[in-house]
Image (cartoon, rainbow, N blue to C red):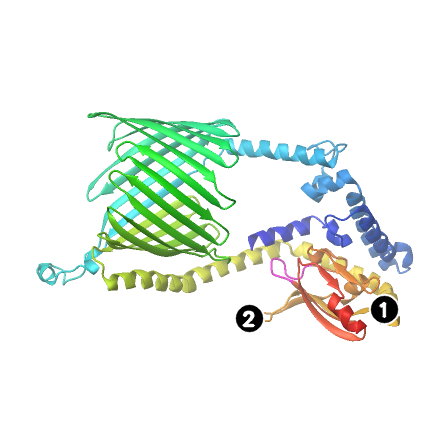
Amino acid sequence: MAAALENELDTLDNDDYYSLLNVRREATQEELKASYRRLCMLYHPDKHRDPELKRQAEQLFNLVHQAYEVLSDPQSRAIYDIFGKRGLEVEGWEVVERKRTPAEIREEYERLQRERDERRLQQRTNPKGTISVGVDATDLFDRYEEDFEDMPGGGFPHIEINRMHISQSIEAPLTAKDTAVLAGSLSTHNGNGGGNINLSLRRVTSARGWGEIEFGAGDTRGPTFGMKVFRNVTQRCFVTAQCGLQFSSRGVRPSASTMWARHLDQNTMGYLQWRWGTQSAMTTSIVRDTKTSHFTLALQLGVPHSYLMTSYQYKFQDEDQTKIKGSLKTGFFGTVVEYGAERKISQHSVLAATVSIGVPQGVSLKLRLNRASQTYLFPIHLTDQLLPSAVFYATVGPLVIYLAVQKLVITPYLQSQKEQELEMQRVNSASDIAKKKQEAESAVLLMQESVKRIIEAEESKMGLIILNAWYGKFVTDNSRKNERAKVIDVTVPLQCLVKDSKLILTEASKAGLPGFYDPCVGEEKSLKLLYQFRGAIHQVLSGDMESLRIPKQSHRIEAET
């Protein structure tokens, strides 16, 4: 919604020359010239004797001439495509020299853009954080009556927070190739806790690799030192390797690991990892990620844990990016089955819930909220046993709560926020809309004589005649009947665009066409028209940014038959 509003405001601030001439953005010089000549014949001031119409014709004629001058010149067109009308209005155009070719202009602009991004990157940190709050709710299901009879409080279940973890990191770009990362964490579990801090320095050595060194310290472990390297071996294969030393009162504990990855096909990766240290293991996995699904198969052999794991995630192709997932993991520690779903609830927030059922772990519910670069985790342990009631409430409870909150809180809040933003945009653009409306009405007056000639010519050969046409917001949903339709009559402007019994509109906002303006800024618009072709009457409804070609091929076949 916000992106649509920004695009429409840009259209108000910068005349869309392509839409004004009704040509594609890839239009050739011949197409530009043909459209320009046609509009010049329509708006030429010498065709009007009335002083007011003559003045209005001069304004529209000059605007069409200005659009053609810009788009017919390769250098000006390249500048306009990149910067818009504002780029042409800069005196001397300080950004790049005007005499360069379009390719050189684009290359220079991309270079300046990269430099600006690098400057911003050097001044910006990239904070990332995680907050995890573990809840012990086993008292809800694993209650023993003899114990509860002796407890004060009337037998209410006891729910407590038994663990917490907080971590935060920030990045500080030092140069275009060097980055420093400072990270820290605090953890507590059943009254015992600690923390640590880490500083790492990363350097991009080439387009194919980078290296990193890390220093750390904390009260849960002694000082640590580590190194890590990444390298693209080929276009389809890369390798990472790292080693570390942990210093403690018991001595020095070394560790090392390496991973080899290869693209098996366009959507499939294969991984082979070896880890040596306190928990040595060899792991191999296959990951397939497509537009609609994500599949993982992994096998680990090691001390003390060996397991086989498979997981599958299905991605719905909707605006909320809904995903459902399930996994099975079995090994020396037992077996765990997990299933859950995640959904985007706002522009920067994703909510997920996962039910975990395992032996001997029991039943748990894991809630996750991602807000921009911050992650909030709430693992809730429900029972140590496999109880059907715990599985049922862990599955149904979050779903019911989400639907209630979505309907009663989130949806009304987002709708109210959109309406406020839309109203603000309307107020800010009111003067521009009034100006566009006046220009459109003037254009329609100038088209009257031409339209009469076009209709006479089309009637003589049973060609294309626009009977009625409207542009704007149409209310068709019964639940929105109380809303008022916001449309304008564009019968005359569309008939004026008919040539050789054809009407062709390009993929651009129709608000920029001669005789059009935007009657409802920030809202979805469409074009509805009723036309006659070869004696038959047809009706068409087209989206604002959709291309349109009338008559359709099927209409021609019917007429010939």
Up the image or down, 123 lies above or below 309; here it is above
| Position of residue 16 measured from the top left corner of the image (x, y, whole percent) | 72, 50
Residue linked to disc 1: 458
In the picture, measured across the screen, residue 191 lies left or right of residue 535, that is left
Up the image or down, 345 lies above or below 233; here it is below
In the picture, measured across the screen, residue 408 lies left or right of residue 224, that is right
Up the image or down, 129 lies above or below 112; here it is below
In the picture, measured across the screen, residue 273 lies left or right of residue 442, that is left
Give the residue type that dot 2 points to: Arg
The question of residue 77 being in magenta is answered with: no
Graded by Cα atoms within 10 Å as few (under 14), some (14 to 19) or many (20 or more), the crowding at tag 1 reads some
Q: Quadrant of residue 427?
A: bottom right
Closer-to-camera residue (364/412): 364
Q: Quadrant of residue 324?
A: bottom left
Closer-to-camera residue (351/421): 351
Graded by Cα atoms within 10 Å as few (under 14), some (14 to 19) or many (20 or more), the crowding at tag 2 reads few
| Position of residue 143 measured from the top left corner of the image (x, y, whole percent) | 16, 60
* Residue occupying image coordinates x 73% and y 53%: 19
The question of residue 524 being in magenta is answered with: yes
| Position of residue 477 measured from the top left corner of the image (x, y, whole percent) | 57, 71
